[in-house]
Amino acid sequence: MGSLENPTIFWLLPVAIVSIALILVIKKGLKSLYWFTFLLIPFSLEYTLPGTDAVISFPVEGLTLFISLYFFYKIIQSKVAFEVLLNPIVIIVILDIAWLLVTSILSSDPVVSGKRVAMRINFYIVAFFIPYLASKEKKWLIKPLFLYVIGLVPVVFLVLFKHAKYDFLAKFSYVICRPYYDEHTVYGAAIAFSIPIAILLLWAKSQHGKKWISQTFLFMVIFALFVGLVYAFSRAAWVSLLLGAFVFVLLQLKIKPKIYVIGLLILAIGAYIGKNKINEYLSANTAVSNTGAIYEHATSVTNIQSDASNLERINRWVCAYRMFQDRPLTGFGPGTYQFQYANYQTTEYKTRISTLEGNRGNAHSEYLMYLSETGLPGFIIFILLVLTTCYLGIQNSIRTNGPIRQINNFVLFALVTYFLHGVFNSFIDQDKIALPVFAAMACIASIHQYHQKGIENGD
């Protein structure tokens, strides 16, 4: 499988990419480089810096750093209206950055945390603040996301082509997406996020009366993304897309925020009342992942008795919680979970696939990762970011009409897939997910700030 994971021809791409980037800067200016960067995200490859153990995603992390530095230069030269920063999502993002800085100083490993926070700030600047501040021009609302999806499509085709050589067997899904994506869960999350954006692109083309040829091509693209999602064998991605689609339907019906809250409360109460029945069902489920059968792979998501993947996920969750108990206020510091969790494993929860090496481990939950690495304040800030983004997205859907409303609804659909997937996996520190997710958050914030032109219907 070595040649499958790191085909030599793919490692020649960065040379061509850097050459194109330089030509764009010279001929078209930095705005073209910005668009080009989003197109490149799915193609970016990991390199280990010579003489160090530091890994960078090249060339995207380098390009985003350059763009961030230029952004700071322009901000110093110009003035930003203070009221623009009063958007609820913007305020919470600033709080998140501030607390990440605090926890990195108090970290169990300040060097690791400092690097992680620097990269997070870089991602926030490029994918959130730049499109948010520029999005009075409507093309900035969605263009970064469109370009990300366009870049992902050829990667999906390449992965499907490679996977076909192995008869689409599940056991190859873990590494078949390399070198572009580390493993199948982040690859599946990227596809699940991209499908609503691709459908939005098709809807936009149909609204503008584009030729049937372009619409047929987009149908083929969407079909390929669905096929790619199926053969990513990521159960969390499948579930998140289905639940995201359900939320999208509710958005189209203009359901008010309080109805969502009531619905969630009813579900929580129902789950509590029927907890014994639920436990019986979970105990009876013997389906396991990686058998090669798609149906069994899907139904194994609720097997917490014998499925090694699910049991290891629970092990990581327990470790994250026990880490939080030791350092409840500030956590162990951003980026430190993988170096600390081994000490918090117990015989009760360890599995046959557990490791003490801390090799690229994470909490298998965006939320518990925040809890263990940044303590209760960081966890609350992240929860507020998720809930506020959803709340404003629902408000936008009620208060706007026409194309802006559909942009909002599809983008929130995409974000919901990530928010739900985040229960089971953690990708927010990877450019492959962080950049499109932050750009989607910027879109929701921008519509709330600049583009609410519909009828005020209340909350």
Image (tube, rainbow, N blue to C red):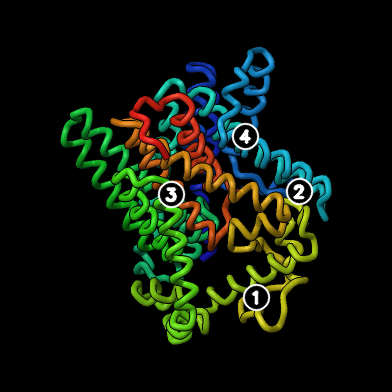
Based on the displayed image, in which of its 4 quarters is residue 30 positioned?
top right
Based on the displayed image, in which of its 4 quarters is residue 149 positioned?
top left
Per the model, the C-alpha gap separating discs 2 and 4 is 22 Å
Judged left or right of residue 354, residue 455 is left
Disc 2 target residue: 113
Depth-wise, is mark 1 or mark 2 nearer the camera? 2
Disc 3 target residue: 258
Three-letter code for the amino acid on which mark 4 is drawn: Ile
Three-letter code for the amino acid on which mark 2 is drawn: Ser
Judged left or right of residue 412, residue 175 is right
In the structure shown, which secondary structural element does the residue marked by tag 1 occupy?
A: loop
Q: Residues within 10 Å of mark 2 (few under 14, many from 20)?
A: many
Disc 1 target residue: 354
Three-letter code for the amino acid on which mark 1 is drawn: Ser
Per the model, the C-alpha gap separating discs 4 and 3 is 23 Å
Disc 4 target residue: 91
In this view, the residue in front, 410 or 173, is 410
